[in-house]
Amino acid sequence: MHELGLQYECRPILPRSGETKTPEYTKLNPRQKIPLLQDGSFTIGESAAIVTYLSRTYSKPDSSLVPDDPAEFARWLEWCIFIVSELDSTSLYVMRRHGTNRGLAHIYGAAPGVVEKAGEYFRQQLHHVEVSLEDGRRYLMGDRFTSADILLTTCLVWANEYGVGICDNAMPYLERVTSRPAYQKSRAVNAAEL
Ligand SMILES: N[C@@H](CCC(=O)N[C@@H](CS)C(=O)NCC(=O)O)C(=O)O
């Protein structure tokens, strides 16, 4: 939203607090999960779907977060799905659910072997990012910043916080994205909300 210059109102519904299970919230999101976006009468969940919906709906032609050209669009989509499925769901989120270091093992059960393997798998998959960044591109899609960079940055920051370690050439990339004014503003807002 900050990248797109959108005004919004944040309603802090906390995870694992029971707040996602109330009848009122369940009516809004039967999946009983956060985040959830309400845009007028339209409601959508799943963080990557929210990012994509906002990018597609509110991008300006000169600073679009989603490519229009069909081949570029397909490449962008490939990145988004790769990040969400391989880097996030199969790797980092598994570490989060079953880890004891900043994890939720007390809720979902400790599984040290699984956490270790998930970390290894993350590093293995991150090799695709490493190879792509080797040509010196500024962002995943080249010179142009897209919503795929938002998704990847979340994973890289998360991996660093978990001490998983990211590839060397992802460090300047990460620095580039996290220096963006929109990123800085959104981190400050999130910190204030928590
Ligand atoms: N794939 C979903 C995952 C969302 C998710 O699992 N959210 C957790 C918090 S991080 C949640 O709402 N859990 C239910 C609860 O804690 O009540 C997304 O990316 O939006």
Image (tube, helix red, strand yellow):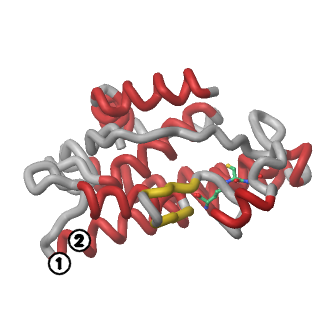
Extreme residue toward the left, this view = 62
**Horizontally, is 31 left or right of 193 in the view?**
right
**Residue 171: percent from the left, percent from the top?**
38, 33
Q: Is mark 2 within 8 Å of ligand 1?
A: no
Point 63% across, 38% down: residue: 12
Position of the C terminus by quadrant: top right
Image quadrant holding the N terminus, namely top left
Viewer-nearest residue: 155 or 6: 6
Q: Which residue is mark 1?
A: 70
| Numbered circle sitting on residue 73 | 2
Please report contact status of discs 1 and 2: CB closer than 8 Å, yes or no: yes
Q: Position of residue 24 (x, y in %)?
A: 73, 58
Answer with left or right where residue 116 lies relative to residue 49.
Answer: right
Residue 73 picture quarter: bottom left
Inspect the image, locate mark 1, and give the three-letter code of the amino acid beneath it: Pro
Q: Count all numbered tags in the image, as a single digit.
A: 2
